[in-house]
Amino acid sequence: MSNKDLIIAAVFAVVILLVIGAILGVVLVLASKVFHVEEDERIKEVEKMLPGANCGACGKAGCHDLAEALVKGEVKKVSTCKVGKKDKNYDPIIEYMKNHPDKDGTTHIPTI
Ligand code: SF4
């Protein structure tokens, strides 16, 4: 095999990899569109009101998980967040949840 043949084979291999990469990229973009799950926007808002330490002291993987549990009514007490403060975290979350019911009108208002 001559040097010219090696160069052609290398260029061909690179082109094949680029084409495969482009195809997989398109597949990933389409999959992200098809399988996109809309998250309740209240979860993000409640998460912003939590301390953001992501320490896991609440028994959840992080602040996002506790926010989700509070919004879904799976956790009833905001003081489950051990790092939070009444004025800075607990009261604003309770107030927010009072004013933002579920789409079906039900509310999961946590207590301290
Ligand atoms: S205890 Fe509070 S600060 Fe720590 S992860 Fe849970 S919600 Fe976040």
Image: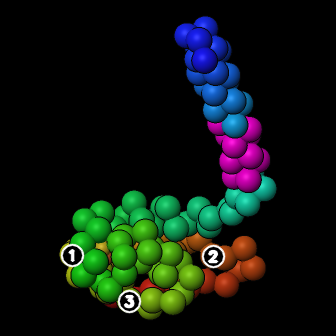
Q: Where is residue 24, by image quadrant?
A: top right
Q: Is mark 3 within 8 Å of ligand 1?
A: no
Query: Residue 101 shows which numbered tag?
Result: 2
Amino acid at the residue labelled 3: Lys
- Ligand 1 shown in quarter: bottom left
Residue at figure coordinates x 48%, y 61% from the top left: 45
Disc 3 to disc 2, how far (Cα)?
17 Å
Residue 29 image point, x, y percent = 70, 44
Disc 1 to disc 2, how far (Cα)?
26 Å
Crowding around mark 3 (Cα neighbors within 10 Å: few <14, some 14 to 19, many 20+) is some
Residue at which label 3 appears: 77
Residue at which label 1 appears: 83
- By secondary structure, the bulk of the magenta-drawn segment is best described as helix
Disc 3 to disc 1, how far (Cα)?
13 Å
Residue 109 image point, x, y percent = 50, 84
Q: Secondary structure at mark 3?
A: loop
Determine whether 21 is above or below 47 in the image.
above
Determine whether 10 is above or below 81 in the image.
above
> Is residue 30 inside the magenta stretch?
yes
Observer able to see residue 103: yes
Residue at figure coordinates x 49%, y 61% from the top left: 44
